[in-house]
Amino acid sequence: MTTPASPSPSSPPPQRPHPPDLYALDHTNTPQIWSALLTSRFPYKPSSFLASLHQMFEHPEHNTSWILRSDTLTPSESEQPRSITLPSFATTRTLLRRFVPRNPHRDAPALQSCHFLTHASLSGEIRELVVYLNHCDSAESTPYYLPKVRGVAWLLFPASSSDDDGDDDDGGDETQYCVSLLYSYFNANGEPNNVRLERTAHHLLSRAIKLAGGIEAGYEKRVHHDLVIPREEFQDRYLALRAKHATRLVGGWREKTDPRKHVFEDILIATFLICLWERMYQGKEKKGWMGFVDIGCGNGVLVDVLLREGWTGSGFDARARKSWDGFEARTRQRLREMVLVPYLMDDGIETGKGEHDGRFEEGTFIISNHTDELTPWTPILAAASNCPFIAIPCCSHDLSGAKKRFPPPKDLQSEQSGDLRLNMNLSKSTYASLCAYVERIARECGWVVEREVLRIPSTRNVAVIGRRRKTNFLVDVAEVVRREGGATGWRERVEELRKKESICH
């Protein structure tokens, strides 16, 4: 049970007559009254009702932005589910969860018990009841993100013939159902009308019905997060890094852009990288760690956070940023103004002052975060120097630095058996095609390609990762460059980057 941050945009379901109140005993054998606030027709199967409520249990963050997630707990001596007893209902499953608030400094975590109960009459009629029990003992101790009641319940019950208003399309003798949203109030005599509780009830009932409809329609999740790093590990680390760095970085912001967007996005990317690196370079010695290089580091926030977290490395960009002067001396010393002119472009001109030729010490981890023209070069340069990499594509360019829209991929399956279209709505988008293009180049360069849809506030949120090479795979990276059209015009285009404001950074 969670409270939506704002009223649900969908209209409330049509109302039906409420079922009688339910009378129960709580974990202390104290009587409880459960009263229906909303009742609606439920045109789906009981199994879809149970599946939808299980989804809502697993993902409370979909109900309100105040919650980051919930963790399902194993009962222990200190943390036990709170029980509930209802005449003629049998408990089939009990779960215990702890809410993790998005801002732990503002909101406290909270425990909640979830019970799935069922009742079958002699005539075969099925009633399903799902109950969420608040572990807080008063409205005052209940966090803001939860409705201030003892509990919330969804009751599925057969609709009587008098409830049928003729709008059902199912026909036949199949049982029709209604669903009610019930509250158990802290005040035994009920609560006065409360707009917030009513709004929450509309949202929770509508969502349960909508999810059930999607389940019966065969809905499949289109975008899959957390393929490389588990969600809980990532989110817990992010909360720690945000508390440690966000206030300092936002307060010292010197750019014209919105610090809330850029600071939090770079902290999120730093979180993912640190979690990834801790798996790649284990132990206090970080065995195998050769440092990182952020090519096209922009405002430098990502470099600063990584350095402060104990990871050695540096960053460079075609133009210095005002924000660089606001960092501590250690970070400023690791940020350089230079453009990358890959030696593989083979134009016969030696690398000049303020230019990097794209050669890196073997094993250096290359970060390519929204680097535009450098994005397709990233897996090529990484292969040439035998360096692992991460590329987060943004704007679409070819190896010459010219803007180009790549055709949608013909092979829609990646090495992770993921759909290269990213999701069904992006099947022919420029961004989906760019990501597939970068992945294809990476595979041609011998990388075992992984993809992660990052949890960042950007629609350009796909990370293409290469941390392992294919065994006994030989590749001529210069030939890959030639096959992809070469790099004629690169120098002229990157010189323009010194003169203009970066669009995507």
Image (cartoon, grey):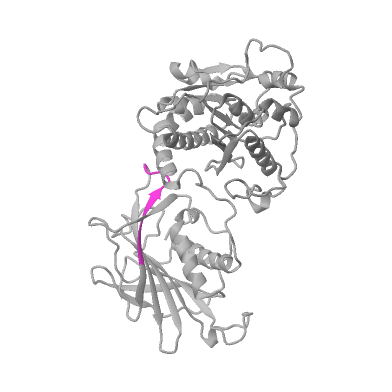
Pinpoint residue 85: horizontal percent, then vertical percent: 30, 74
- Residue 441: in magenta span: no
Pick whichever, 204 or 451, lies toward us.
Answer: 451
Q: Which residue lies furthest to the bottom in this view?
A: 123
Q: Going 47% across and 61% down the picture, which residue do you hit?
A: 56
Report the magenta residues as a range.
94-105
* Most common SS among magenta residues: strand
Q: Is residue 176 above or below residue 302?
A: below
Pinpoint residue 216: horizontal percent, then vertical percent: 58, 69
Question: For this view, does 277 lie left or right of residue 257?
Answer: left
What is the quadrant of residue 244 in the picture?
top left
Question: For this view, does 114 lie left or right of residue 451?
Answer: left
Q: Going 54% across and 42% down the picture, which residue do you hit?
A: 454
- Residue 104: in magenta span: yes
Q: Is residue 403 above or below residue 193?
A: above
Q: Is residue 428 visible?
A: yes
Pinpoint residue 489: horizontal percent, then vertical percent: 76, 22
Pick whichever, 451 or 392, lies toward us.
Answer: 451
Pinpoint residue 209: horizontal percent, then vertical percent: 54, 68
Q: Is residue 505 visible?
A: no
Q: Going 41% across and 86% down the picture, which residue do you hit?
A: 121
Pick whichever, 141 or 72, lies toward us.
Answer: 72
What is the quadrant of the C terminus in the image? top right
